Each structure stands twice: as C-alpha cells, then as structure tokens.
C-alpha cells in the first residue's frame, strides 16, 4: 500500500468483465488491432504496444462508484470512451500514479462521499505533478475520490480513492 491516504485504481476486474460484454452505453465492444500502439489502457494503466488487440468502450465511472458506495452524483455522471484489453490482462498492481501516464496535461476532479464535485485542477504537465496535486486535494477531508482525465478529449484515465 502507498504512503498516501489514497489509492490509485484501474477499472476493477469485475467491471471489466461487464464492459467486455456490454459497455455503459449499451454497446457490444468492437475489438481491433492498434497498429500504432500508445493507447492508454484503463484495465492495466499502461500504454498499448504496436499490434496489440484493444477495444474502445463507453464507461461511466461516477455511476459505477455511486452503485458501489451509495453516492448520488446526479448531473455529474458522464459516459465516455476508454481503452481496455478485450480479454483478460494482468491488471494494475501499483500504488502510485503510473509513471507512463506522467507528463501529459491532465484535469483532476475531486468528489465528496455524497458524489458532489468539490473542485478541479488543470495540470500542464510541466510545473506541478499529478502526485503533488492528488496529495493537495486529499488534504481536504471532504475529498473521497479524485478522477483524472485527459484534457484534449476529456476521457477518464483513472480513479483514486481515499483509503479508509
């Protein structure tokens, strides 16, 4: 476990199994070969390799979090695209923000245990790191979860949750 009071979470294996059958928009996945590689995989929090088979599926992270925790995010629920392996993979075993995902511009959104958005931060990839920003956000005792998203497309990258 990390020295932090939060954990980094990829999409849970049970959720991945559901998404591999039918995604959160009701679509069946359409696996394909990623010729170029580099797709940010949300199942194992690494970048895809050239020629690797992947799938782009719709995912509603706040809706799923609400079902699990009883939160009521209301209008903050979003459905968006994420890349996953269309079959099982080794998953994510780390406890810090994945090094391979550092350096890009990111948006971090903090949520209360009730599912209300508490604030957000835009990172430019140069001055303040995701790790520093997560630590700062979790210094607020009201923050229960922080979602990290890509700036350009708004896609969900990963979730962090307060431990305990």
Image: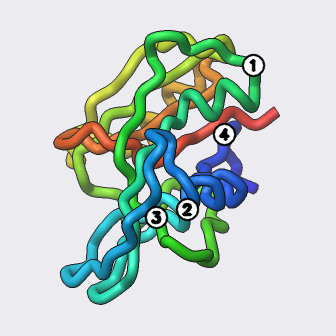
| Circles 2 and 3 in contact, beta carbons < 8 Å | yes
Q: Choose the circle earlier in sequence order: 2 or 1.
A: 2
Residue at position x 66%, y 39% in the image:
6
The disc placed on residue 70 is 1
Residue at position x 71%, y 28% in the image:
67
Q: Relative to 18, say whether 65 is above or below.
A: above
In this picture, residue 46 sits left or right of residue 159 = left
From the image, state whether disc 3 or disc 4 is nearer to you: 3
From the image, state whether disc 2 or disc 3 is nearer to you: 2
Alpha carbon distance from label 3 to label 1 = 26 Å
Alpha carbon distance from label 2 to label 1 = 24 Å
* Secondary structure beneath label 1: loop
Alpha carbon distance from label 4 to label 1 = 19 Å
What is the basis of the colouring in this image? rainbow
In this picture, residue 111 sits left or right of residue 17 = left
Q: Which residue is mark 2?
A: 20
Q: Choose the circle earlier in sequence order: 2 or 4.
A: 4
Q: Choose the circle earlier in sequence order: 3 or 4.
A: 4
* Secondary structure beneath label 3: strand
Q: Which residue is mark 3?
A: 84
In this picture, residue 70 sits left or right of residue 25 = right
Q: Choose the circle earlier in sequence order: 4 or 1.
A: 4
């Amino acid at each position: 476990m990390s020295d932090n009071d939060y954990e980094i979470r990829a999409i849970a294996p049970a959720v991945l199994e559901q998404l591999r059958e039918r995604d959160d928009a009701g679509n069946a996945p359409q696996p394909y070969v990623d010729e170029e590689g580099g797709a940010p995989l949300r199942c194992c929090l690494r970048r895809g390799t050239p020629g690797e088979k992947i799938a782009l599926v719709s995912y509603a992270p706040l809706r799923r979090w609400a079902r699990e925790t009883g939160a009521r995010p209301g209008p903050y629920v979003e459905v968006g695209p994420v890349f996953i392996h269309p079959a099982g993979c080794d998953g994510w075993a780390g406890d810090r923000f994945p090094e391979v995902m550092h350096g890009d511009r990111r948006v971090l959104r903090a949520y209360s245990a009730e599912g209300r958005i508490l604030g957000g931060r835009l990172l430019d990839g140069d001055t303040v790191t995701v790790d520093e920003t997560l630590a700062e956000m979790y210094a607020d005792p009201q923050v229960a979860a922080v979602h990290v998203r890509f700036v350009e497309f708004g896609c969900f990258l990963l979730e962090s949750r307060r431990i305990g």
